[in-house]
Image: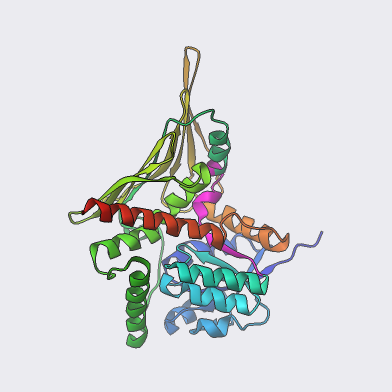
Amino acid sequence: MTVKTLNVGIIGLGEVAQVIHLPVLETLPKQFRIAALCDISPKLVAHLGDKYNVENLYTDAAELVKQADLDVVFVLNSDEYHAECAIAAANHKKHVLIEKPMCLTESEADAIIEAQQRNGVKIMVGYMRRYAASFVEAVKQIGGFENIQYARVRDIIGPNRLFVKPTSHVVSFDDIPEALKADKRHRSEKLVKEATGVNAESPNGQLYRLLCGLSSHDLSAMREALGMPKGIVGAKVTNNGSLFLTAIFDYDQFAVTFETGTDGQGRFDAHLEVYATHKSVRVQYDTPYIRHLPTKLHVHETVGEAYTESVIRPTWTDSYTLELQYLYDVITQDLTPKTTPEDYKQDLVIFKMILDALSRNKI
């Protein structure tokens, strides 16, 4: 059986590309070949082109997507540009992987879906936590529960630099044109205003950015494990130097507590835990910026008088590698990914639920 190697073009060569995507692609040489690189920093493109022996180098994403031999484009740049780059790639008949968040507004999401359907390509959102083996197993076990009593979703982490700096070498250069920096700020203000009705620098604007970034992982996983909430009971946000959000989702027969925030501590506490009457399961994530730290499944169960606690590590393979292996199958076997643009739109609905609940609290 002949294995097709997919040619990959990468747009955006920042931290996530350098620490994760480029090294992971190198470990999958039969499935992927890095065939083009693009970043708005000319020196960074040249540096990484030399490091990864890539000849096709660009500073304009619109030029990269024209490269005829590319099979798939990874959109890893700043999220203000995700929709534009994904649509351009689709219009040139390229499949697309978009890092989260897919986009910031509903109109962008609709435009991405339209481009996907019109061009007959695969577009997959990079929610790697949903591809972790422990999460996949947890979803199976949760599906076997006769009833759910309660669930908790939590993501409280410290600065990524506390994990990245001691373990990885990330390169950057001070050569980005001022006009492009200004364009990024302008786009951010415009898109957040469209999505929320408030300014990007306002408290709710900052919260929306947190929801689209860190929190989107957790809310997406919550949806796969439990479905969409019926509504939201209430929400509270605090910002006493660090931004924190607590919300309670209504799932009719049970509630889900959602806690998220960032502070200055060097720890990563992200998990989803679901409680039934005699059993609970928890998926515990660690920082993805130190590759191969395992995602673990914790199972607590009582049968008769016997209470057991189990910690399961299904594999050492990290969730990003599992995600890219899944992407390969999606493209080569003409499958529909579970993290589609249509699926992502449900996260935008939940973001709005939270903002609406916060607005009600102020009345």
- Answer left or right for 358 relative to 141: left
What is the magenta range? 121-135
- Residue 217, given in percent of the width and then of the height, sits at 44, 53
**Residue projecting furthest to the top:** 305
**Residue projecting furthest to the front:** 363
Q: Nearer the viewer, residue 339 or 353?
A: 353
Q: Nearer the viewer, residue 266 or 223?
A: 223
- Residue 277, given in percent of the width and then of the height, sits at 46, 24
Please say whether residue 289 is visible from this viewpoint. Answer: no
**Residue projecting furthest to the left:** 240
Residue 186 lies in what quarter of the image?
bottom left
Residue 342 lies in what quarter of the image?
bottom right
- Answer left or right for 37 relative to 7: left
Q: Is residue 271 above or below residue 309?
A: below
- Answer left or right for 1 relative to 84: right
Name the residue rendered at 66%, 74% in the picture.
119
Q: Is residue 341 above or below residue 322?
A: below
* In magenta stretch: residue 129: yes
- Answer left or right for 35 relative to 220: right
Number of marks drawn: 0
Name the residue rendered at 50%, 59% in the picture.
344
* In magenta stretch: residue 226: no
- Residue 224, given in percent of the width and then of the height, sits at 52, 47
- Residue 115, given in percent of the width and then of the height, sits at 59, 73
Give the quarter of the figure containing the C terminus: bottom left
**Residue projecting furthest to the right:** 1
Give the quarter of the figure containing the N terminus: bottom right
Please say whether residue 144 is visible from this viewpoint. Answer: yes
Name the residue rendered at 50%, 29% in the picture.
147
Task: Check the image and tell me how it is coloured.
Answer: rainbow
Q: Is residue 114 above or below residue 307?
A: below
